[in-house]
Amino acid sequence: MNKTELLGALALCAASLLAHADEDSLRIGIEAAYPPFSFKTPEGNVSGFDYDIGNALCEEMKVKCEWVIQEFDGMIPSLKVRKIDAVLSSMSITEDRLKSVDFSKKYYHTPGKFAMKAGNVINDPLVDLKGKKVGVQRSSTYDRFATEQLEKAGVEVVRYGSQNEAFLDLASGRLDATLADIVNTDESFIKTPAGKGFALVGPDISDPKYFGRGAGIAVRKGDSVNVARLSTAIDAIRANGKYQQVMAKYFAFDIYGE
């Protein structure tokens, strides 16, 4: 074998090893600031429903989960530039997002809800919240709903990098309300000392135009291989009971939805 042939063989071998490594691992983006779905423990470890479901899926697919923690609004850009292979961070499957990424099938589905001082009544958010300050998480489905519906109705929308920041401003009186996932709001705010005196109010917010078909796992546009294997793995862990085991750690009801 001459030098040229040797270099070609080595390059081919290296490419094969890299491809094998990619097949054996999955870089997954997660926010880690959205309890009970994803959060950091006092020891600094990532935990939560999303994290545990992701690990169960990786085990089912026989790949290694490589978790990449970052802010929610940077997830899709990171996916597009290949810093990550998937987003498993309570991202709703919407028509708008499907223009730029693909999704697995859903792995849970819950509605949104407003949180306000207890005693407030909301029959029609577009009427009853006019002139009030409502906080949402930037780049979330609630941000889009607020932009297209609440702002146009005269509501002052305040955007935050994380939902926890909105909860802090609500508790301190800098907001009149916040709109977020009903489970996240109840578990990480209403039921905590900071949420004393606050309540979930008004109708469920679940217009499919904005909130889609539930939370799925986002992958790059055209990545049919990961769409298929992630969707198959979701079905598998629901069939073998692992999904229910994870769910029972965090919820007393079936979060998968209809």
Image: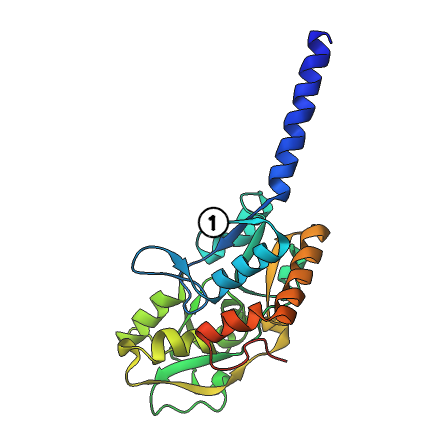
**Residue 118 in picture, x, y percent from top left:** 33, 89
* Front-lying residue, 54 or 86: 54
| Residue farthest along the front direction in this orientation | 240
**Residue at position x 67%, y 25% in the image:** 13
Q: Give the crowd class for mark 1: few <14, some 14-19, many >=20 residues within 10 Å.
A: some
* Front-lying residue, 116 or 72: 72
User: Tag 1, which secondary structure?
Assistant: strand
| Residue farthest along the top direction in this orientation | 2
Q: In the visual, does 190 lie left or right of 236?
A: left
Q: In the visual, does 4 lie left or right of 97?
A: right
Q: Is residue 212 above or below residue 101?
A: below
Amino acid at dot 1: Val
Q: Is residue 175 above or below residue 89?
A: below
> Which of the 4 image quadrants contains residue 105?
bottom right
Q: Is residue 139 visible?
A: no
**Residue at position x 47%, y 58% in the image:** 72
Q: Quadrant of the C terminus?
A: bottom right
Q: In the visual, does 14 lie left or right of 122?
A: right
> Which of the 4 image quadrants contains residue 1?
top right
Q: Which residue is mark 1?
A: 68
**Residue 228 in picture, x, y percent from top left:** 71, 57
**Residue 34 in picture, x, y percent from top left:** 42, 65
**Residue at position x 39%, y 76% in the image:** 187
Q: Is residue 173 above or below residue 117?
A: above
**Residue 115 in picture, x, y percent from top left:** 39, 81
Q: Is residue 149 visible?
A: yes
